């Protein structure tokens, strides 16, 4: 099978790493890829939103499947264009991807079809949003409606902070993504990320993970795209996952079909779980980043047949995926200044040494200089991931590897998985 993988981050490096192990793979090409992905397959310099060029590349390599990593490619209709060209795609159409690309759409869908989620209101103007705050109590949850790279959420502790967040979003902080804001009631509980592969008719649960959004230890600092993950997540008990499948995943799949936009790809449900009862925080229309990294380390089954079945509508023909009875941890190494103003160009040494069979370093925002040096070229730059028989062992391996990477221009949180190890 010839596969085109679209994307350039740590999520895509993890997908490339897993796809490259597939017995059914003939050729893997990534666009645009990154220096880490380039060690696994051919990379082509095609941007993730260059739809025409990506369709052309898929046709050129006679792709049997295109695997779309980032949400930006989904938002501009890559899956739609590939369908028109007769190329199977793992990833939803632009209409189905509205579950992620418009929080207002997602919340309205949840309300219309009875999916459990927080009370909410969408506003297009600051005056309307300020007035809507009267119907909520602190802490206030303020979200940019559109795509903001995981950074468009503010949990405001008081009214002044909420109004400042609203003004910043509607004032252009996130460009068009903030042209509308969604105000939500704050949900109590613990967050988890749950994934399901979907083919428009069938949903197959595909693992859960715990994500860390804040930049610094102790959940301090601004929201980021994610500073680390671990899996399995203790809060995602079998009871909570079963409830989420029944009240969120399957109803959402049916709802999108009824809305005329069948969902094919991976449905990512951000959950708030309280006493095994999940509520929807938000939907995403692709693998989480960096949740994907720990899931790929734990997945024992060949990934490629599941991606192809999701694209072709045949998931019901496959057995449930097989998972390693191990834990996995991902520690994100980010550039100084991330998320607001990450510094680029600093040299990274030691990231490409061998750390042992249970450790993988996925490139998330790197570039190769003409002299061969590896340099930072993004906010989140490296994902240091490890497996272990226990979460404590996986965590120790990941942090031991991170400590061996010589990169004064970067930083990472030291508490990924820490609370779960201390209080399992």
Image (cartoon, rainbow, N blue to C red):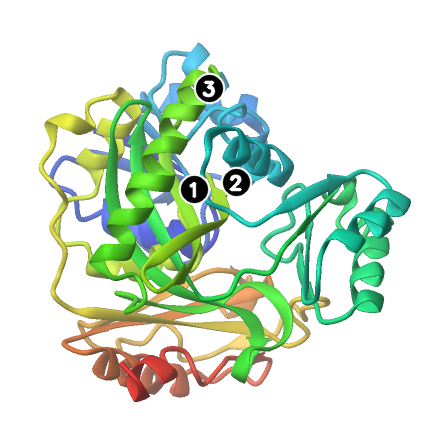
Q: Residue at x 40, y 26 (%)?
A: 263
Depth-wise, is mark 3 or mark 1 nearer the camera?
Answer: 3
Q: Which of 197 and 11 is in front in this view?
A: 197
> On residue 261, which mark appears?
3
Residue annotated with mark 1: 286
Marks 1 and 2 close (CB-CB < 8 Å)? yes
Cα distance in 3D space between marks 3 and 1: 16 Å
Q: Which of 163 and 63 is in front in this view?
A: 163
Q: Earlier in the sequence, mark 3 or mark 1?
A: 3
* Residue 318 placement (x, y as % from top left): 11, 32
Q: Nearer the viewer, residue 364 or 182?
A: 182
Secondary structure of the residue carrying tag 2 is helix
In the rendered image, which quarter contains the C terminus?
bottom left
Residue annotated with mark 2: 71
Q: Which residue is drawn at 44% across and 19% down?
A: 82
Cα distance in 3D space between marks 1 and 2: 6 Å
- Specify whether residue 342 is in view: yes
Secondary structure of the residue carrying tag 3 is loop
Secondary structure of the residue carrying tag 1 is loop
In the rendered image, which quarter contains the N terminus?
top left
Cα distance in 3D space between marks 2 and 3: 17 Å
* Residue 29 placement (x, y as % from top left): 35, 38
Q: Earlier in the sequence, mark 1 or mark 2?
A: 2
- Specify whether residue 47 is in view: no
Q: Residue at x 26, y 65 (%)?
A: 232
Quadrant position of residue 327 = bottom left
* Residue 3 placement (x, y as % from top left): 30, 32
């Amino acid at each position: 099978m010839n596969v085109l993988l679209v994307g350039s981050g740590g999520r895509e490096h993890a997908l490339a790493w897993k796809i490259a192990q597939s017995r059914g793979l003939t050729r893997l090409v990534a666009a645009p890829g990154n220096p880490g992905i380039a060690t696994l397959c051919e990379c082509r310099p095609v941007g993730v939103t260059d739809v025409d060029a990506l369709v052309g590349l898929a046709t050129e390599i006679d792709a049997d499947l295109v695997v779309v990593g980032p949400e930006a490619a989904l938002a501009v209709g890559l899956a739609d264009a590939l369908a028109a060209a007769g190329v199977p795609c793992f990833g939803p159409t632009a209409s189905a991807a509205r579950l992620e690309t418009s929080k207002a759409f997602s919340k309205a869908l949840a309300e219309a079809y009875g999916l459990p989620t927080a009370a909410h209101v969408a506003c297009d103007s600051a005056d309307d949003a300020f007035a809507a705050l009267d119907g909520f109590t602190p802490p206030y949850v303020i979200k940019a409606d559109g795509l903001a790279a995981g950074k468009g959420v503010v949990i405001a502790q008081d009214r002044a902070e909420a109004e400042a967040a609203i003004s910043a979003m509607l004032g252009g902080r996130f460009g068009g993504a903030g042209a509308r804001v969604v105000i939500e009631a704050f949900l109590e509980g613990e967050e988890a990320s749950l994934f399901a592969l979907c083919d428009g008719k069938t949903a197959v649960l595909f693992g859960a993970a715990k994500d860390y959004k804040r930049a610094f230890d102790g959940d301090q600092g601004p929201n980021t795209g994610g500073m680390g993950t671990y899996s399995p997540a203790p809060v995602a008990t079998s009871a909570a996952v079963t409830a989420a499948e029944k009240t969120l995943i399957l109803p959402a799949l049916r709802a999108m079909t009824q809305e005329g936009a069948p969902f094919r790809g991976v449905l990512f449900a951000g959950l708030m779980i309280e006493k095994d009862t999940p509520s929807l925080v938000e939907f995403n229309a692709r693998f989480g980043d960096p949740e994907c990294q720990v899931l790929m380390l734990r997945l024992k089954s060949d990934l490629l047949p599941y991606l192809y079945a999701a694209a072709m509508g045949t998931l019901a023909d496959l057995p449930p995926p097989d998972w390693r009875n191990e834990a996995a941890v991902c520690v994100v190494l980010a550039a100084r200044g991330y998320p607001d103003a990450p510094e680029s160009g600093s040299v990274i040494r030691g990231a490409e040494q061998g750390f042992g069979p249970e450790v993988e370093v996925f490139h998330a925002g790197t570039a190769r200089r003409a002299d061969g040096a590896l340099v930072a070229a993004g906010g989140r730059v490296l994902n240091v991931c490890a497996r272990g028989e226990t979460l404590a062992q996986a965590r120790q391996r990941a942090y031991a590897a991170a400590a061996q990477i010589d990169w004064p221009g970067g930083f990472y949180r030291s508490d990924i998985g820490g609370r779960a190890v201390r209080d399992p």
